[in-house]
């Protein structure tokens, strides 16, 4: 049995991404792997008190143990809440007439025709 495992540490910005492959001792934690990779020297904006981390797209804690082939990912903080952005977009669509004011879905053009026919 080997005393080291192969892992990757990744971080990315819109204009620059890094994937660092390295060997760490067996039973290393996520924090130890990040420190061993030196990625915080490349990206000085990484704050492990603020940035969430994960292994293969699943969030984890800094003290979680790594296994052979794991990919440690450092996530950037969200700029906007996705739910709020979607809510504002839906409100704008309703105001512009691109969405039904009751259901939020696409307006039914037949509904307008029925209303006009009933008015006559």
Image: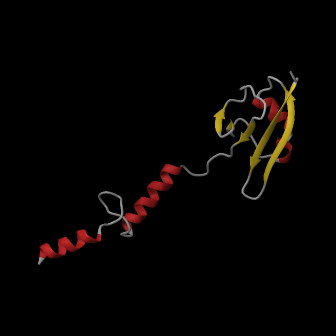
Residue 101's quadrant in the figure? Answer: bottom left
Report the residue at 75% width, 38% height from top: 71
Q: Quadrant of residue 120?
A: bottom left
Q: In this view, does 62 lie above or below 9?
A: above
Q: Is residue 111 left or right of residue 34?
A: left
Q: x and y percent of residue 52 in the render?
A: 67, 38
Q: How is the image coloured?
A: secondary structure
Looking at the image, the residue that sits furthest to the front is 1
Near-viewer residue (39 or 28): 28
Q: Residue 45 placed where, x, y %?
A: 77, 46
Give the number of marks.
Answer: 0
Is 93 on the left-hand or right-hand side of 77? Answer: left
Q: Position of residue 99 (x, y in %)?
A: 36, 64
Q: Which residue is painted at 18% across and 75% down in the image?
A: 116
Q: Determine which quarter of the picture holds residue 104.
A: bottom left
Taking 36 as reference, is 116 above or below it? below
Question: In which quadrant will I find the N terminus?
Answer: top right
Q: In the image, 89: left or right of 20?
A: left
Residue 73 spot, x, y in % from top left: 72, 41
Q: Residue reaching furthest bottom?
A: 120
Picture residue at 76% right of the left edge, 31% below the top: 30
Q: Is residue 87 above or below residue 25?
A: below
Q: Is residue 92 above or below residue 50?
A: below
Choose between 47 and 110: the one closer to the eye: 110
Taking depth in this image into account, of 108 and 44 the one nearest to the observer is 108
């Amino acid at each position: 049995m080997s005393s080291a495992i192969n892992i990757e540490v990744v971080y990315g910005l819109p204009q620059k991404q890094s994937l660092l492959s390295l060997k760490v001792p067996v039973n290393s934690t996520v924090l130890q792997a990040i420190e061993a990779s030196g990625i915080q020297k490349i990206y000085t904006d990484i704050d492990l008190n603020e940035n969430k981390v994960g292994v293969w797209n699943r969030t984890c804690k800094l003290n979680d143990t790594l296994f052979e082939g794991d990919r440690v990912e450092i996530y950037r903080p969200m700029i906007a809440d996705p739910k709020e952005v979607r809510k504002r977009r839906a409100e704008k669509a309703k105001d512009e007439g691109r969405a039904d004011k009751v259901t939020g879905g696409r307006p039914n053009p037949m509904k307008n025709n029925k209303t006009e026919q009933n008015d006559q």
